[in-house]
Amino acid sequence: MLRVAAKRLFVTPSTAPSQAVRVLPRFYHERVVDHYNNPRNVGSFDKNDPTVGTGLVGAPACGDVMKLQIKVDEKTGKIVDARFKTFGCGSAIASSSVATEWVKGKQMEEVLTIKNTEIAKHLSLPPVKLHCSMLAEDAIKAAVKDYEAKRSKTTSANGEETATGDKAATA
């Protein structure tokens, strides 16, 4: 009787009833860990600055929220700086950090070609974390769209040529 009770209390791995239900630890790629532990370009710019575009996106399913801002040189159209603030998991923070690194020094049209699959591949994200790289892509697009909307608004207000080449009427 005592042996039966002891076997029930002290089940060793070799005597465990279901060997197939072993849970293996999940490890993140070293790039994810690096960008999580040492995130690049954390912070924000003044959202009212006409040279700044802000993209704010979120994933309701997991609760991740990402704000990515770009600062654009109006003369050259190049992104001279980028910042982010992210509330979410390590993969979301790493995706934001990588996105800000990749957009710096590039033209507006060029950053729109950055795809979530490239970010996911660079970070070796598992399939369950692909939504983080999708957020980063969406944040880039939203920041560019915001900057272009601000630019067209200030261009129209100044009576300069609009994107279609027509002169805007001044009040």
Image: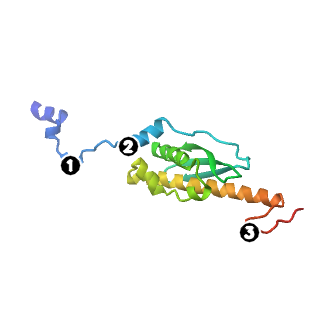
Secondary structure under badge 2?
loop
Circle number at residue 20: 1
Which residue has dot 2 on it? 29
Residue type at tag 1: Ala
Asked whether the beta carbons under mark 2 and mark 3 sit within 8 Å of each other, the answer is: no
Q: Position of residue 155 (x, y in %)?
A: 78, 58
What residue is drawn where x is 14% and y is 31%? 6
Judge left or right: residue 54 versus residue 10: right
Secondary structure under badge 3?
loop
Q: Dot 2: few (<14), some (14–19), or many (≥20) neighbours within 10 Å?
A: some
The C terminus lies in quadrant: bottom right
Instruction: From this view, report whether residue 9 is shown above or below residue 66.
Output: above
**How many labels sit on residues?**
3
What residue is drawn where x is 48% and y is 52%? 133
Is residue 128 something that shows in the picture?
yes
What residue is drawn where x is 73% and y is 50%? 50
Q: Dot 3: few (<14), some (14–19), or many (≥20) neighbours within 10 Å?
A: few
Which residue has dot 3 on it? 164
* Badge nearest the viewer, 1 or 2: 2
Residue type at tag 2: His
